[in-house]
Image: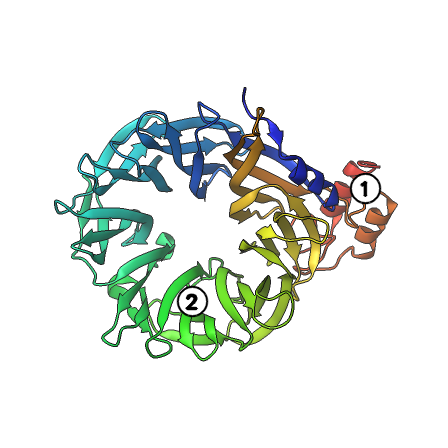
Amino acid sequence: MRATIVSGLLASLLTLASAQVRVVWRYVYTPPQDDLAAHLERAVRLSDGGLMLLGWVETPLNGRDALAIRLLPSGAEAWVYQVDGAGFDDAFVDAIESANELRLLGQFTDADGYLSAQVHRLTPAGQPIGVFTLSRTPNTHLRPLRFSDYDQSNANVVAEVVQGGVSQTLFYNASISGYRPFSPFSFRPWGVLPGDVAVDYPSAILGTVATANNSVDAIFSTLNYGLHRYSGAPRGVDIPAVGAVQRFAERVNYYVGVQSEGGVFGEDAVLIRYSILGTVVWGYRYTNQWHDDYAEDLAIDAQGNASLLVKSVLWQGEPYERRTLRLVRFSENGRLLSDAELVEDGRPYLSGLVRVNETGQRYVAVSGAVLPDAPQGVSLLARVDASGQFLWRFVSEVDYDALFAESDGSLLTAGSLVFEGQGFPTPYYRRVVAVRYAPNGDLDGNGCVDDADLLQVLFAFGQQGADLAADLNGDALVDDADLLQVLFAFGEGC
């Protein structure tokens, strides 16, 4: 019997949620058998407002198959594309829309146990067009990371090649006939920041390189445009953990959060703003002698202000080793604007995402938070103002892995969900899930759209700004559209 009952504990926690958002639709992928797992590697928002869910699904025969699911803007499943490889480590890891087709970047294991990479070309309807296998030297691992913007093409590929225990970066240039590799770059790749093909700004590759004094430095590279090497404390380890691009500006700026270890105060989060040439515009070291700080996620608004999500492990006070999540904001010139604690306690797996939409509204998704009335870790979805205060907060059972802030004030999310099956002992199954949320007009969060909500819109009518709770449609203006949204929902939940 298919598992359809949400864990009782998490379901009860939903009653704690402020009813300021509603679920527009929810999609759950169910594998062929309940005891087979499915995992989300990446979610990609498509130009039509739909989603591509990429990852793997277990099979009863040979481990894992690469899995790609296309969802329509309505949340309906358009198609599922599943590829059976020869080994256990098969997965789709990225997708792009290119020249009226979809390209899926896949990692597969060959018969000898070596990792290889393929690009699968599909029509928008999910019909296979062809497969490009990326060339590699025999007896080497080739691990694909992401598609990359370069030379007016968004279909290039960045991959890691491992031979003889040495890791290097390999870049593949896309052409009509396939993919041509460049000479390897002598650093290990950790991630890729998207560029902008329209203005010929390339993706940035983030990586690490070992040094002569037994330390590890962080690398920022835009290929032949520029490269920068960040070295923190002597004999320390510096790893690029998060990155973001200023998407709503004429000239692209790259922001990188580096996890820096080895200083006087332990683990620090270093935020660096780079130009396309690899030069440092400014840098800021977020440090404290009483806690370790880990960069979790990063978002940039249209003015270049940075919102850095930081997990801090506190070494002072009770309870000892308490984990918190903070939202730290910086100006476009690197000045610290605010530092607010969003979650005061969390499980060891506490993590989060932060996003900013085109009008500057900030959203966070948190997994592994501990609430006073909740004995286990839960997830939170929230909108916060410039000082880090909640404008609304929604308790959820979804472990969020992807978050997209839409221009209409709604949110697209993807992640995993635990279902409770039937039997003894009780089986639990983890499923891939996607959910779209939207404001429902209940501004004060009392579970009822009533006169108080209507008055809140009327009192704020005509005001402009990114931090207005009454701005329901995300256009940074409280106007007729927001008033109508409350009026149409009037009486719901009462």
On-image quarter of the N terminus? top right
Q: Mark 1 points at which residue?
A: 449
The answer to whether 306 is drawn above or below residue 36 in the figure is below
Q: Mark 2 points at which residue?
A: 259
Q: Which residue lies furthest to the front in this view?
A: 425
Q: Is residue 343 above or below residue 27?
A: below
Observer able to see residue 88: yes
Question: In this picture, is 220 found above or below 105?
Answer: below
Q: Residue at x 60, y 73 (%)?
A: 316
Q: Which residue is drawn at 16% across and 55% down?
A: 164
Horizontal side of 481 relative to 449 (left or right) equals left
Residue 473 in the image, given as x and y percentages of width and height: 66, 47
- Tell me the SS state at disc 2: strand
Give the alpha-carbon distance from disc 1 to disc 2, as whole Å.
44 Å
- Residue type beneath disc 2: Gln
Horizontal side of residue 392 vs 141, given as left or right: right
Disc 1 residue crowd, few under 14, some 14–19, many 20+, Cα 10 Å: many
Q: Farthest residue in the right direction?
A: 451
Foreground: 24 or 401?
401
* Residue kind at label 1, given as amino acid type: Val
Task: Pick whichever, 465 or 157, lies toward us.
Answer: 157
